Structures are given as C-alpha cells and as structure tokens.
Image (cartoon, coloured by chain):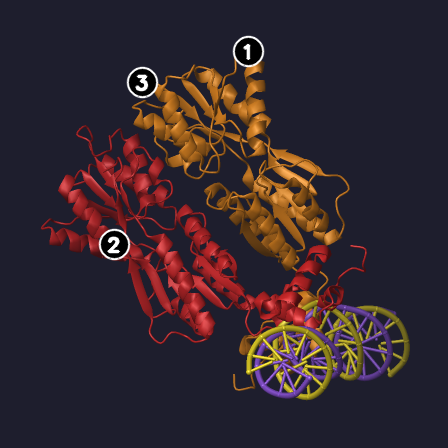
Chain colours: A red, B orange, C yellow, D purple
Amino acid sequence: MNEPKIRNMEDFAAASGISRPTVSKYFNDPDSVRKSTRAKIEAALKTHDYRPNIYAINQNRRQTKNIGLVVPNLTDPFFASIARNIEGLIVKQGYNPLLLSSHGGPEQEIANLDSLRSIKPAGVLLAPLGRASDNAQLAEFTEELPTVLFDANIDGIGEAFFGSDNDQSIGLIVDYLCRTGEPPVFFEMKNPINPNAYKRRAAYLAAMERLDHTPHLIQVDGDGWNFEEIGFREGSRILADRGLPSNTVLCSNDRLAIGLLSAAFESGLRVGHGSGSALRIAGHDDHPFSRYTCPSLTTVSQDYESIAARSVETILGIIDLEKRRENREVTLFEGRLIMRGSA
Amino acid sequence: MNEPKIRNMEDFAAASGISRPTVSKYFNDPDSVRKSTRAKIEAALKTHDYRPNIYAINQNRRQTKNIGLVVPNLTDPFFASIARNIEGLIVKQGYNPLLLSSHGGPEQEIANLDSLRSIKPAGVLLAPLGRASDNAQLAEFTEELPTVLFDANIDGIGEAFFGSDNDQSIGLIVDYLCRTGEPPVFFEMKNPINPNAYKRRAAYLAAMERLDHTPHLIQVDGDGWNFEEIGFREGSRILADRGLPSNTVLCSNDRLAIGLLSAAFESGLRVGHGSGSALRIAGHDDHPFSRYTCPSLTTVSQDYESIAARSVETILGIIDLEKRRENREVTLFEGRLIMRGSA
DNA sequence: ATTAAATTTTTACGCGCGTAAATTTTTATT
DNA sequence: AATAAAAATTTACGCGCGTAAAAATTTAAT
C-alpha cells in the first residue's frame, strides 16, 4: 500500500521476505513450498496486489498453460453450450482455455489454428468443420500440437475423437417413429458440411432396412450453416409440392427441423403425434431451443457432457505425460430419446 | 528448408539478409521499411516459416495488440452474433480480439476482467451483465484499462456507451400494436437482470400514456438467464388463469416471447395478427431464431451493426490517441419494426 | 557529382521471469 | 545433540524481442 509500487516478481519477493526463485516456485505450484513460506507469500499477496507477467512466464516456461478450443460456429447455441462446458472443465484443472469460432468457414478455421500456433498452447480441442475443412492443414497442425477432436471426426487426425454414436441414436429414433406411426423419411442436405450428417444418413438407411421398411431420402439444396433457413425454404417447397411419401419426417439435425416446423406451420399443416395431426417431425441433437418450438421437438439428445469430459481428460492426460497417444482412440457416446410434442 | 532451423528473429534476420532491428521494424509495420527490404523479408518468410514469439513481443511492447471482448452470455445467439461481428471489425484493424463470456454470472464477469488484466489488452469492449454486475469492481477495472460499454449501460462506467434507444424502439412497436388491434400489456420479469429491461418498462409506460391507453404490466417471477423457460412457465400459468386483460402481449425481449409462444401453443391458443387468432405476441431484439417461431415473431430489431461498428471505432480511437475521453459519450441507435406473423 | 535526407546496420541494454547449480538454512529423524 | 533430508537462498544465465543511439549506407534532390 504505502510501499514502493511492486513492479515485478523481484519487488514482490522483497516485499514478502522470500527470495525470488522461491516465489517463482510458489506461483508454479503453491504446494511446492513450505507451508510457512506459502503463508508469508499469500499474506504479501493480500496487501500488495501483484500478479506475475503472463508474457514473461510463457516466454520461459517449457509449456504454456493454454488450451485451445476451436468450435465450428459459436452462433449455434449447441456449440456455445458445449464450449462453455469444456471451458469450465479446463479452468477447473488449472489451465487457461482460449475459445475460437471458425464461423462456419474453412479459412477461419485455418486462421484459428494459426492464432493458436502463436499462443503455443499445451494442447488443443478441435471440433472441425468437417467436409469444408482443409484436412491437409489440419493434419499438419495436429502433428505440431497435441490435438483431440470432438463432435466431428476426421479419420486419422488428432490423438483421439469423442462424439456421438449416430448409428445408435438414429437407430433409436427411427425405431421409435416406426413403432408409433408411419416409418419416417429422412430430411437432409444434399451435400452436408458435417461428417455426422453422412453417418446419420447411413444410419437411417441401415435402421430402415433392419426394420423392413423402404427408406426414403429427401435431399435438399443449400449451402452454409443457416440450417433453419434451408429447412424452411426447402421444406416449404416440398410441402407445397406434396412431395412427402410419409407423414413422418426425421431431420438430420434439429436446426433443419426447426426450419421445417416453421414451414409446416405456415403451410397450415398441424404437426404432432396426436390423432389430429397431419405431420410428424423429429430432429437430432436436442438443441437448446428444441424445447420451445411449436410443438416442442421430439429428438435425440447427445451426451455432450461425456463428450466434453472425456475430451478434456484426454488432452490433459497427453499433456501431463508429455507423450502422444500410440493408438488413436475413437469413443462414441449414446444418445437418449427425447419424446416431445412433434412426433 | 535446408538451412539450420530458424529459432528466433536473429536467425530469421540472418536468413533474410537484413539486420534484426529492421526485421523487428518490419513486423511492427511492414510499411515502415524500404520496399526492397520488405521484399527481401517477405521472400525469406515464404521459404522459412518464421513467426515472432508473441510472448516476447508483448513483454517488451508498450502496448499489446489485444482487445478484450466480454459478453454476458455466449449461449444466447444474440450475443454470439454481435460478438462475431465485433471480432471481425477488430481483426480488420490489425488487433487481436479475446472473447470471453460471463455465462450470466457476476463472479465470472469479474473473473473475465481479471483474466484480461493478465493479458494487458490495449482496450476492452464490455457488455456488462447489468444489475448483477459488481459495479465497484467494474469501475475499478475501467480506471485501469480503457473500456467501452455496449448493449447495457451502467452510468459513469467506461469511456462511452453504445446501445439501443429503447424509448424509440418500444415506442415504435407499441404504436404499431395499438394501430392494428388492442393495446398491449407488457410481459416482463419482476426483477430483470438487464438495465435495458427497466428502460423498456419505462418506455412502454410512456408510450401507452402518450397514446391515451391504460398500461398494464405483467411481471413474472424468475431468476437467471433461461428466459424461454421463464416465459413458458409463467406464460402457461397466466394463460391458464386467464390473467390477460388484453389479447395483445408485448414481451420485454424475444426470448421471453419465444417461451410465451410455446406456452400459448400448448394452451391451444392461436397466436397471430389474423382475424382467427386469439392472441397477439410481440417481442424485442429480433433474435436470430425469431424468424422461425410458429408463428414467426413480430419484433423490433436492434441496429447491432452500428453498435458494433461504433464501439470498435471508439475504443480504437482511444487506443490510438493514448488518451482517455474527456466526456463519456452515450449514443443510442434506433430499432426497426419487423412485422411478422405473431402480431 | 555533391549534398541532404531517409534507411539500415551495429552495438547495446533491458523487459520479467524460468531455471540450474552451489551454498546456506531449516526441519525432521534418531 | 548429532545427522540426514528438505527447503530456501544466492548467484547467474538465458529466453526472444523492443528499442535507443551512433555510425554507415543507400536513395533522392539539386
């Protein structure tokens, strides 16, 4: 307070009556110093308000405490939510998360990885864009820095992948829909960006075959990440054309379903699982807004708590051991059926 | 390629045939060196893949090129969207945005500011939580680091504030609703978190008075940021109690409106501006999902492009001049009426 | 070609901290 | 009290770069 200003660790060490190297040791791990000296330092910390210069620290440490976290699109509450979850876990482990969004674009994704290189993170958690990603550059990056993929898998890239078991989850909802009404058609984009979309398509086909039903894919045009818009526009067109061979539609994801619901509403079609309804619509992901659509959306939730937990656990394990994985781990988590009003 | 590895600027300078100080000058501003030397450096850059160590740079520079960007809740697509917008502008100006979300909690907000202190940003753009914010700590922070507030104003804190003109925007939609049907009641939270909510309440009261109608506030209980949930739960209750003195409801924000729409739907009430509808619902903000509600939501859009642009412009101006503002600027932007299906 | 102005080079220091080695002090053990 | 073990101190160097000052060089102007 009254003392000369604390300008660096040297000043602070003097103020606390401890040598600078020991103070340095303390900041790297408070438990590594004697209790009595720890108490002295923390007493000084209370009256002096000093914090080590993060740039000087990181310039000299072998490893930073930074962990990069790259998601494809923060504007999508699904990713915002999982990112928040992961951030919390990283902080709890004493690391510093750096959240970057690729905003749906591969250039931004590469730019994000480039930013991360500058920051020299100890590890990276990456949910890649998928089809749009520049796989060669991603591969190069993951050679440089230990990286764990989540949400969307790209074969052979990264130390591990954690995501959803689309076979299981799509199988689950297809089964449910078949048991409760007409077998579903599958509503998706013709050229999906996300690898999960391809998995889900295949899962749908397999599930329908298993149940002895004829599958039917409705593949609509559309670029980009504005899925609601695509679902609405293409859905409106198809409903106007009476192009649906079933009264039940399973959408590749909830955001398409939200658009389709909107299209159905404007077409005057009543959606729901009740007897008075003309159309059943189901989605996939249990998007944060799915609870509040009209009617609320029947869907499959992803176990993103597990995905987040295992991803963080894995990257921190690699960082601790300072050793890459020998085998690339791929673990898929099961989804849960969320029965709501729409199907 | 074949050369010995480039480990630092010294190595790189040698490789490019230029002295290290000049190379340093180049990285700080490529235009500050002669064209011919710039060409040499950039040629070397192509074959050698070197990037200056960001920690060493920031340790020595008077100012970093970092700009903090703190939003109350990234899970809300509205903030995700404005954050993205701002990030783009910051990058375009050669600065490095650092996005942090307070996740709706004042502790996290303070923690975010603390993280920013470590990073020594040249300036900060802050959308505060509002009522929940620890104003004393915010004030202290803004003394330390030049900060511009946006979205939610806190008197006297920060160099400037840019946000929406709630008087104008609420006035606009109240006027519209009165011209096209019954005067609206106002649906809001009893103890709103956001200062805008108080402004909107006052604006509603003023607008109704101006138009010679009796205002009616419906103030519901609820904590936190799960506005859809609150709108749904409390909306369901009120609709069941037939507690609405008007068939027109203006919600304090779109997320409440989305919840209320959902409640109305489940109550079997038809919402819309047509003759066959029992209820009109309007919102405020033009939330990204408002286009896809059923029916689509009539609302007022915020001019967040202007808010973003002016906020960035202002903080960069302060940084350039290295001089705080003498007078705190407060600029409010007008909203636009978005007429859709719900009212 | 001469002169002045603009750039680059050389030299040197410092930023704040991590970290290693040798020494001294403190604590735990018998 | 003697000894060993643990921890702290002292001393010193280096990280990679910004930056300042003086000297040398290049470019532009006359």
Which residue type carries mark 3?
Gly
Give the residue furthest to the left. A212
Using the rendered view, name the quadrant where residue B128 is placed.
Answer: top right
Q: Residue at x 75, y 47 (%)?
A: B324
Residue A39: x, y in percent? 65, 62
Counting residues from the N terminus, which is met first, the one under dot 1 or under dot 3?
1
Q: Which mark is residue B276?
A: 3
- Chain of the residue displaying label 1: B
Q: Which residue is tagged 2?
A: A200
Residue A176 at least partly seen = yes
Which residue type carries mark 1?
Asp
- Chain of the residue displaying label 3: B
The quarter of the image holding the C terminus of chain B is top left
Using the rendered view, name the quadrant where residue C15 is placed.
Answer: bottom right
Using the rendered view, name the quadrant where residue A21 is placed.
Answer: bottom right
Question: Is B190 in front, or is A179?
Answer: B190
Q: Which residue is tagged 1?
A: B212
